[in-house]
Amino acid sequence: MSVDRQMLTGSFRLMKKLNKTVILNIIRNQGPISRADIAKITGLTPPTVTNIVGELLDTGIVEEGELGKSSGGRKPILLQINARASFVIGAAALTDRTVLALCDLDANIVEQRELPPLPSTNEAFVSTLSDSVKQLMQEAHVDEDKVLYLALGIHGRMDIRRGVLESVPAFQLENLEIRDLLQDRLRIPMVLDELVRAETLGEAWYGAGRNLTHFLYFSLEEEPGMGMVVEGQVQAGAADAAGELAHARVASAEERCPEGHDHCLSGLLSADGLRAALGLDGKATLDEVATRLESSEADDLRGRAALLLGQVIGMFVNALNPERVIIGGALARSHFVRQVAEQANALFNEANAGRCEVVAAELGENIAPIGAATLALRQLFGAPRLV
Ligand SMILES: [Zn+2]
């Protein structure tokens, strides 16, 4: 039998890349840790571990720290992530604001800017975003070669693999090859994803979803959205459109949405729906909507919104059996989240009652930029894509 040399070297290379990712993640999650302990955990031979660790030390992402406990011989040198060796930038393009965050490799925010919404149309959107990123790096005194990845989170239809925003009505973007355009301007590798999925990933790595393999995240911003983690992976669906709840029709939704759909979730669970129901001006900010929704004069309305969202959550929980439901976004304040939890809990079936808890997101108001930054960190620490 002849061996396909190219395929064989290809699979060795992939194996090495996988081993490198595995070791990097062990150092990230369990460091400071010795080479010997990494070998024990992974089952790799000590020379293989030493070899791969050497490459990681060369990149500067991993560093040698203090000495560990001796198990007879010399004390081992412990390895840890050098979180400030390099950075990532997370950008969240929301309709009422743009948030940019320069983060270290532990997702701590080093420098953050909140700016007006990005302008509409392809050209203006790209140039303003690119200028804002440059400005952020200047203010933080960080050179572009220290920024490993830039990630953009935005609501809309997109092709993640090709880095193309296919249709983003909020910014009138159509077929925008944003990844290539930004990489040309900034010389930083770039990734993009739906902002709700980015926030889901942020909660999975740094928030209320840590150490969970199954959870749901509900985002309450201009429109309702959902992210789901199944078997430890954020799901994007067949056409990168999983979790789109805007304008989903549900018989129990009484309101007609601003776009004229009867029984539409956006009729009550979108910012525009709530603005109308609360008698607020169309220009009222999300903060104003959230504050009013929490007030005692909005008790009835909040109760109805909580019942509707609770029903949606109850259905997904019964179907997907998650360990937890996390609720975040600008409209997710404490009274509302507690009432949603009560309504959802009452609808859980036997398999889920008392087992699945509904909680508020831990990343709070930073969930959008940290979520986007986590997309960038996934490029660094996540497993390589096999397909
Ligand atoms: Zn609608």
Image (cartoon, rainbow, N blue to C red):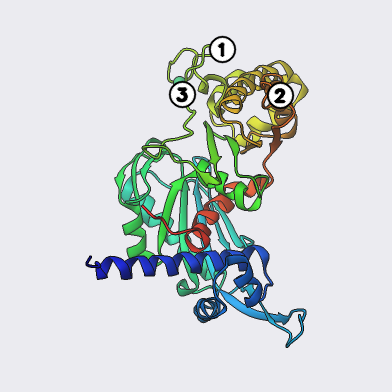
Q: Is residue 176 visible?
A: yes
Query: Looking at the image, which is closer to me, 62 or 288?
Result: 62
Q: What type is the residue that disc 2 sits on?
A: Asn
Tell me how far mark 3 sits from mark 1, CA to CA. 13 Å
Asked which quadrant contains residue 218, the reply is top right
Q: Is residue 105 visible?
A: no
| Residues tagged 3 and 1 counted as in contact (Cβ below 8 A) | no
Query: Looking at the image, which is closer to me, 177 or 99?
Result: 177
Single out the residue that lies furthest toward the bottom: 74
Residue at the disc numbered 3: 247
Q: What type is the residue that disc 1 sits on?
A: Ser
Q: Is mark 3 within 8 Å of ligand 1?
A: yes
Residue at the disc numbered 2: 345
| Residues tagged 2 and 3 counted as in contact (Cβ below 8 A) | no
Image coordinates for residue 340, horizontal then vertical, percent = 69, 25
What is the secondary structure assignment of the residue under circle 1? loop
Asked which quadrant contains residue 348, the reply is top right
Single out the residue that lies furthest toward the front: 1
Image coordinates for residue 287, horizontal then vertical, percent = 64, 36
What is the secondary structure assignment of the residue under circle 2? helix
Q: What type is the residue that disc 3 sits on?
A: His
Residue at the disc numbered 1: 252
- The residue carrying pointer 1 sits among few (fewer than 14), some (14 to 19) or many (20 or more) residues within 10 Å by Cα, namely few
- The residue carrying pointer 2 sits among few (fewer than 14), some (14 to 19) or many (20 or more) residues within 10 Å by Cα, namely many
